[in-house]
Amino acid sequence: MKPNNLRAAIILILLASAGTQAQSAAQVAAQNAERDRQQAELASVAALRTEGEAQRQAVAAEREASKAARDAERAARDAEREARDADRDARDRTPLSERDQLAIAALEGLMSAGDAKALPILQRVLKGDNSDVVKERALFVLSQIELPEAQATLMDFVRNGTGRLQREAVRMVGIGGDAKVLDELLPIYKTADRRMRKYIMEAYLIADRKDLMLAIAKGAKDETEGDEAIQMLAAMGAVEELRSLGADGRNSRSLIQAYAIAGDLEGLRRIAVSATDATQREEAIRSMGMIGGDKAHAALREAYARADSERLRDAALQGMLISDDQQGVLALYRAAKTVQEKKTLLRTLSMMGGDAALDAIDAALEGKTP
């Protein structure tokens, strides 16, 4: 072989060897890149699990805090009621004079004496110098008499009584349940002090007069008073009355909570769709989760699909988290179009736990859709 030809052959061999080495290096680099990608993906999923657990704990803490606040409020009301009962029990345990014992026994006997005969005796007892214990018992017997004169006497104590006797008279109006007398409490309410207003609200609650409680809510002098009336309407299950407040444009946080307590999904949906305040829309969507059930699940999925902001979508996801709608979140995950949306939904599934979450995590690790 000539020298020139030999040199050319050597150059060709060297070039071929270099090409093979470059190809091998490229393959190694590609394999390393794939391994790094898989490790990054594993780290991302692990981070999602960690973050999901942290958020699940945060949600649980928030639930506990909210429950603790409600329990504290309920405990305060219970304590107040127990204090009143304790005061009454203390009076009951206080040895009564022979005169009071005989008077109370006589009042119990009036229950079967007939209204016409009992009324003048009760009026005399209430006007006399009898003890408050005896008069409280007389007010109860009076509330069971259906004669107009009896109700007029009861209302006289409501208007002009003092202390425990006045409160007992208002309570007896509620227990008696006479519609006309209950109506007469409303004008008194409008000019009464806060203590008396509270007594009247309690009477309406006892008598289940949703219409009068609604009138109080609509005519409330301040937000605190309105919120108290709304809470009582929720306790009474007054769905239509609460919707009436919403129709008037009152979409306060207390009304949203009342809808949730009363189980009024449609009321929440109305606020979620029509409220001009974005925060109220978010709160209404989130509160749907408190109702739970298939209809609430469907409403939350609809709210997520209709959401025109990230905050509204987050509120829908929080509602689904509260109602534990794993299948709903999984369906959204399958339909998600972007990596960011899939990550958010996978994070929510991780917070929920359960089979749906595990299926989604396993599928993400394998690069599949569950």
Image (cartoon, rainbow, N blue to C red):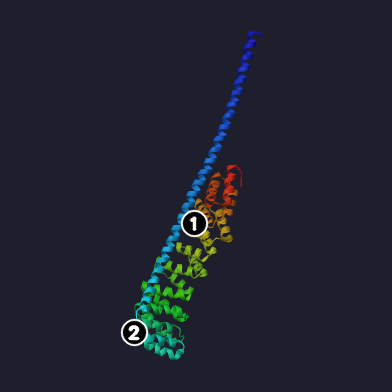
Would residue 298 be found to the left or right of residue 118 on screen?
right
Residue beneath the point at 59% across and 45% down: 362
Which mark is drawn over residue 76? none
Residue bearing mark 1: 282
Whether residue 100 can be seen here: yes
Whether residue 183 can be seen here: no
What percent of the width, then of the height, locates residue 100? 36, 85
What percent of the width, then of the height, locates residue 82? 39, 71
Above-or-below relation of 272 to 191: above
Which mark is drawn over residue 97? 2
Count of numbered circles on the image? 2
Q: Categorize mark 2 by other alpha carbons within 10 Å: few (<14), some (14-19), many (20+).
A: few
Q: Nearer the viewer, mark 2 or mark 1?
A: 2
Q: Categorize mark 1 by other alpha carbons within 10 Å: few (<14), some (14-19), many (20+).
A: many
Circle 1 sits in a helix, a strand or a loop, which is it? helix
**Residue furthest to the top:** 2
* Front residue of 310 and 9: 9
Above-or-below relation of 6 to 278: above
Would residue 69 be found to the left or right of residue 362 on screen?
left
Q: From mark 2 to mark 1, how far is it between C-alphas?
A: 62 Å
Q: Which quarter of the figure has residue 136?
A: bottom left
N-term-proximal mark, 2 vs 1: 2
Check disc 2 and give the amino acid type. Ser
What percent of the width, then of the height, locates residue 236? 49, 70
* Front residue of 107 and 222: 107
**Residue furthest to the bottom:** 117
Image quadrant holding the N terminus, namely top right
Check disc 1 and give the amino acid type. Glu
**Residue furthest to the left:** 129
Above-or-below relation of 55 to 90: above
Circle 2 sits in a helix, a strand or a loop, which is it? loop
Above-or-below relation of 309 to 148: above
